[in-house]
Amino acid sequence: MFRLLAAACLAASLAALSGGDVQAQGKSLKIIVPYTPGSGPDITSRLMAEAIGKMQGANVVVENRPGAGTVIGTEAAARSAPDGGTVVMVANTFVINPHVKRGNYTVEGSFEPVCQLAATPMVLVVQGSSPYKTLKDLVDAAKKGNVVFASGGPASSLHIAIEVLKGAQKLNSSYVPFGGTGPAINQLLGGHVTAVWADYPTVVNHIKSGTLRALVTSSSAKVDALPDVPTLNSTGLAKHEADIFYGIMAPEKTPDAELKKLSGWFQAAMKTAEIKPLFAKQGLFPAVRCGAEFGTFLKNMGQDYDRVIKEAGIKVN
């Protein structure tokens, strides 16, 4: 999902930094990451681990457990003891999975919300040399049967954004899912697909260099880093608001006192001076909401995704 070599190097250095003598302090926390090392959720977790270890004198371990559309790591977290010692890093797929019958957990029934930490835009991109200057140009071409959409997926937040546009404009365009945004972008650069709905960190350098052109984001407002790119809603061609989010959940029945402690730890970590520039290097933006507010955010997102999934008939297989 991210530039893996640089990300892996950063992840390795953060892992080293989060070691030291804090283990002797007696407090410990495991962050299960249902994504691969070097991914955005992994790097975010390691940044949190370093900051919490330093600030709270805790031994914080990041455990990567990817697979099955994040289900393996997520369900492992759900089965963990609800004692405040284990949390899981989640993103949009965490909310989507129950609505496409992927996994045996529910957002509200299997977990307790701790905090959302970060967000990053989703961007619809085409080749920089393509004739499509606006989303309307692309839609007009799609109505003539000349467009192939792609994303990491299927049944991802990026795939859902494509289906929203297709449904709103009655497009019968082909959709090709890939194992991640990176492979989809490679196919776009090779001219094998027409447009990719992508996570911003994967395409930011391509956009800056001009090899890719951003047509719209699905954010609720214009993104400061993309001042010339309109939101999907503002085009009038479809209505959809969604960023990619990263957040922390704890197993169901984790005591309120432990949830409050965890929330305090993560909020304090997000306030450190180093976090914002480190996030910015990864194309991430701090977006903190905790407890019930985060739970409401997840509930509303789930309702939106459920509606789109049913309308578009999205299935995992």
Image (tube, rainbow, N blue to C red):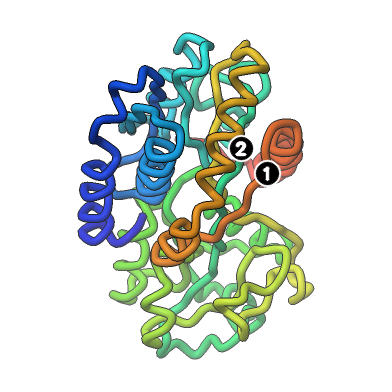
Q: Which residue is mark 1?
A: 289
- Where is residue 272 shown, x and y percent of the image? 50, 53
Q: How many marks?
A: 2
The answer, for residue 101, to whether it is visible in the render is yes
Task: State if disc 2 and disc 1 touch (CB < 8 Å).
Answer: yes
- Where is residue 220 shown, x and y percent of the image? 72, 63
Q: Residue at x 70, y 58 (%)?
A: 241
Which tag, 1 or 2, sits closer to the chain's start? 2
The reply, left or right, for residue 195 in relation to residue 133 is: left
- Where is residue 95 shown, x and y percent of the image? 60, 35
Q: Which residue is mark 2?
A: 115
* Residue type (three-letter) at the residue carrying disc 2: Cys
Q: Residue at x 75, y 38 (%)?
A: 293
* Residue type (three-letter) at the residue carrying disc 1: Arg
Q: Residue at x 44, y 38 (%)?
A: 52
The reply, left or right, for residue 61 in relation to residue 133 is: left
The residue lying toward the viewer, choosing from 223 and 278, is 278
Q: CA distance from mark 1 to mark 2?
A: 6 Å
Q: Residue at x 29, y 39 (%)?
A: 18
In the rendered image, the quadrant that contains the N terminus is: bottom left
The residue lying toward the viewer, choosing from 278 and 123, is 278
